Image (cartoon, helix red, strand yellow):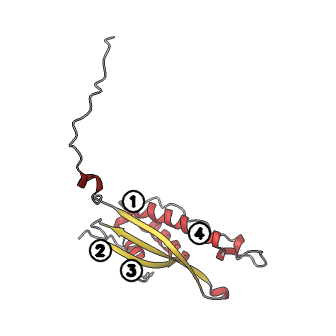
Amino acid sequence: MADTIADTRRLFTKPQNLNDAYGPPSNFLEIDVSNPETVGVGRSRFTTYEIRLKTNLPIFKLKESRVRRRYSDFEWLRAELERESKVVVPPLPGKALIRQLPFRGDDGIFDDSFIEERRQGLEQFLNKVAGHPLAQNERCLHMFLQDESVDKNYTPSKVRQA
């Protein structure tokens, strides 16, 4: 057998200038879930989360948006994506049924540490889903991220690029 020597020379690359290194990225999608607020009293008490979106992807009609959503809205989004898209949808953080039992020594699902843990899980969920190219075409995702309220009676469809 003949000995072969691997070619280890580097490919010629264009020199990087300051604008390339520090300019805005060509495509970006940033989603933050933050500022949890617990509202209501007794059985009608729930926590909402602020969702901030910044992007330059042409598929999104708004380049910046800010909406508030509760956990049940995330459940709705997940169910819609599973039903309508061909995307494998990641799980949401758990329901924490044990935390909802009465006579606990803490605030249950309204405990600060639980809310923070859930916030992180919801942020991971949204970033995984919204980062998927097929999910980015789903109207339910756009409505969830950019419309002030979620119309759960909407007609499922794909979003057309502008």
Mark 3 → mark 1, Cα distance in angstroms:
20 Å
Query: What secondary structure is found at the residue carrying circle 2?
Result: loop
Q: Position of residue 28 (x, y in %)?
A: 33, 61
- Nearest to the eye among marks 1 and 2: give it: 2
- Nearest to the eye among marks 1 and 4: give it: 4
Mark 1 vs 4, N-terminal side: 4
Mark 2 vs 3, N-terminal side: 2
Do residues under tags 4 and 3 come within 8 Å of each other at their CB atoms?
Answer: no
Identify the disc placed on residue 116.
4
In the figure, 40 relative to 162: above or below? below
**What residue did someone put label 2 on?**
61
Mark 2 → mark 3, Cα distance in angstroms:
11 Å
- Nearest to the eye among marks 2 and 4: give it: 4
Mark 1 → mark 4, Cα distance in angstroms:
25 Å
Give the residue type at disc 4. Answer: Glu
**What residue did someone put label 1 on?**
132
Left or right: 20, with 93 as reference point: left
Mark 1 vs 2, N-terminal side: 2
Task: Tell me how many marks there are.
Answer: 4
In the figure, 85 relative to 154: above or below? above
Single out the residue that lies furthest toward the top.
Answer: 1
Mark 1 → mark 2, Cα distance in angstroms:
17 Å
